[in-house]
Image (cartoon, rainbow, N blue to C red):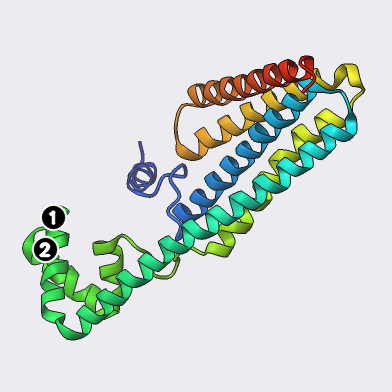
Amino acid sequence: MNDDSASGDAAGSTGPHPQEPHHEGLGTRLNWLRAAVLGANDGVVSTAGLVVGVAGATDSRSALLTAGLAGLLAGSLSMAAGEYVSVSTQRDSEQAALALEREELATTPQAELDELTGLLEERGISHDLAREVAEQLTERDALDAHARVELGIDPDELANPWHAAWASFVSFTVGALLPLLAIVLPPKDWRLAVTVVSVLVALVGCGWISARLGGAPARPAILRNAIGGALAMAVTYAVGALLGAAGV
């Protein structure tokens, strides 16, 4: 092996792996992607359960369309409102923690420096090196250093409740459109089969994507997703059929 190839191998062994990108905000983007996939998954399952249940009671296209649209709007608005409230609470907590940290840095800077040094030591860094790193981080941006090391917060990327609300609204709506269109567009004799097959295919896709984003095995996620969706449709169809037979 020549020197160039050896040095190339050494550089490749110590450099960042292409499978492990280290970009700022990557974790935040992955979280939003997971939330979008889960929102779409919820839209598929809940709307499919609703329209399949109604299909068990009646074959009226107008009734199916009305039920599907009502479920789509109710679900998407509920998801958006829930995400807005949840993320707003998270953001308020993060801002309160940053405000407290800012006050402590202004009133007791030495104690905060000692605290940062101790936190770095807890991560396996020797005392002298931890002190040097803490001093350099403090000189550069004390609040940012404490936010990241002590609080686990990126002060430049606080959660945005409006982004979360819109992401949930859009992803749920997109997911809900699939079973809605599948139940109202085909001929009467094909509606149920087309809906079940299209929903199961969509759930397999959602399970695969969520597993890939989380770095987990795809098979268990796909099976959970598909079985859960199939059970939801089976139960709601059975209930709808019973109510329809009873003339309710």
User: Image height check: is 201 above or below 81?
Assistant: above
Q: Position of residue 154 (x, y in %)?
A: 38, 65
Q: Is residue 232 left or right of residue 191?
A: left
Q: Is residue 57 left or right of residue 127?
A: right
x 41%, y 44%: residue = 17
Figure quadrant of residue 189: top right
Reading the image, the residue beneath label 1 is 122
Q: Is residue 213 left or right of residue 231?
A: left
10 Å neighbourhood of mark 2: few (<14), some, or many (≥20)?
A: some
Labelled pair 2, 1 in contact (Cβ < 8 Å): yes
Q: Position of residue 51 (x, y in %)?
A: 75, 30
Q: Amino acid at mark 2?
A: Gly
Q: Position of residue 74 (x, y in %)?
A: 68, 47
Residue 194 in sight: no
Q: Quadrant of the N terminus?
A: top left
User: Image height check: is 26 above or below 105?
Assistant: above
x 21%, y 75%: residue = 136
> Which element is circle 2 on?
helix
